[in-house]
Image (tube, grey):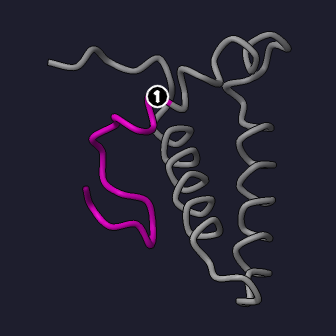
């Protein structure tokens, strides 16, 4: 059984959406219209960085890697537009 995450579900969902958008942008062919993906990535990045979970200045530095790992292994419902694994 997986131990409970120390991150709120909405933060993990944000990170999963960021990872999915980043992967889509990385796979887009050169010259493809990627403006919407780039804008979405910027918006998601802002939402991740300003999430209330990161209230203390050191929280982001100490928790960002753990959040990335938690988002990869989280078993909740997929984010909008994301297929279930």
What residue lies at 45% left-to-right and 68% top-to-bottom?
A: 80
Asked which secondary structure carries label 1, the reply is helix
Q: Position of residue 48 (x, y in %)?
A: 71, 42
Tell which of 10 and 45 is nearer to you.
45
Could you say which quadrant of the image residue 35 lies in? bottom right
What residue lies at 54% left-to-right and 28% top-to-bottom?
A: 67
Q: Position of residue 25 (x, y in %)?
A: 65, 69
Q: Position of residue 5 (x, y in %)?
A: 40, 21
Location of mark 1 (residue): 69
Label 1, residues with CA under 10 Å away: few <14, some 14-19, many ≥20: few
Residue furthest toward the front? Answer: 30
Tell me: 83 left or right of 13. left
Residue furthest toward the right? Answer: 57
Q: Which residues are magenta?
A: 69-85
Q: Main secondary structure of the magenta part?
A: loop
Q: Position of residue 52 (x, y in %)?
A: 72, 30
Could you say which quadrant of the image residue 39 lies in? bottom right
Locate the C terminus and report the quarter of the image it occupies: bottom left
What residue lies at 62% left-to-right and 59% top-to-bottom?
A: 22
**Does the magenta-highlighted stretch encompass residue 25?**
no
């Amino acid at each position: 059984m997986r131990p409970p995450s120390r991150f709120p579900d909405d933060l993990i969902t944000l990170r999963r959406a960021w990872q999915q958008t980043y992967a889509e942008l990385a796979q887009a062919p050169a010259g493809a219209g990627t403006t919407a993906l780039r804008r979405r990535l910027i918006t998601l990045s802002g939402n991740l960085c300003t999430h209330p979970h990161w209230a203390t200045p050191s929280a982001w530095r100490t928790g960002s890697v753990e959040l990335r790992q938690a988002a990869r292994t989280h078993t909740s419902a997929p984010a909008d537009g994301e297929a279930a694994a």
